[in-house]
Image (cartoon, grey):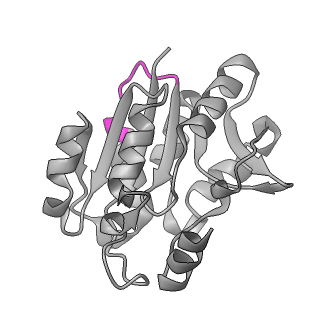
Amino acid sequence: MAHTAILLAAGQSSRMGTLKGLLPWQGTTLFEHQLQNLRESVFSEIVVVLGYEAEKFLPTGKNYSAKIIINEHYQNGKCSSIIAGVSAAGKSTETILITSVDQPLQSAVTNKLAAALTKRPGLVAVPIHQGKRGHPILFSSQLRNDLLSIKEERMGLRHVIQENEKFLLEVPVENGQIHLNLNNQADYINALKK
């Protein structure tokens, strides 16, 4: 079964004040941490969407045999990067994982999502810990066209999830890291303390 992971790393990290992907994380950088965990997962195709200062990430992305996409329109928002990534995903893929460089992954969680969506009927799988949903989010490739038509003004991925709520699988995980979202320096410093 083919699974595709899309790693979004095109933004300017303006709220963080420095490139998020290059921040130290668990002995490496956030960007490399994400790639390592994806390589250790069931996701056979890794699509990396770069934009702002892409040249700083290219060598690492190539080391992981990722399919590198440069989003020239990254200033238009995250939806433009998601569309670029989904467009590059292999046509035979059965699931599409969408994750951001500032949401640290664990391969055990991504594998659990993939297993849930392939074994049970559903179109979207999200991890849940202590009653709260987190990320990353896994979509069935049946939603490819929906993902390709997302818009910032319609809340992007949130719109796709809401439209398919009755086909959504909540996948319980033991890891509270699914709630991490490193938007700014305070988020990052707090996460390092955990």
Name the quarter where the C terminus is drawn: bottom right
Residue 37: percent from left, percent from top: 45, 40
Task: Answer left or right for 156 relative to 81.
Answer: right
Whether residue 93 appears in magenta in the rendering, the answer is yes
86 or 170, which lies in front? 170
**Residue 7 appears in view:** no
With respect to residue 15, does 10 lie above or below?
above
Q: Quadrant of residue 177?
A: bottom right
Task: Answer left or right for 126 relative to 55.
Answer: right
Q: How many marks?
A: 0
> Can you name the residue that lies furthest to the right here?
131
Residue depicted at x 71% and y 45%: 127
Task: Answer left or right for 99 relative to 91.
Answer: right
Residue depicted at x 31% and y 62%: 10
Please give the range of residues in magenta. 87-94
Residue 28: percent from left, percent from top: 34, 56
- Overall secondary structure of the magenta stretch? loop
Residue depicted at x 41% and y 49%: 34
Task: Answer left or right for 71 relative to 39.
Answer: left
With respect to residue 182, does 39 lie above or below?
above
With respect to residue 145, does 189 lie above or below?
below
65 or 96, which lies in front? 65
Residue 108: percent from left, percent from top: 60, 35
**Residue 2 appears in view:** yes
123 or 108, which lies in front? 108
Whether residue 179 appears in magenta in the rendering, the answer is no
Residue 184: percent from left, percent from top: 49, 81
Residue depicted at x 46% and y 19%: 2
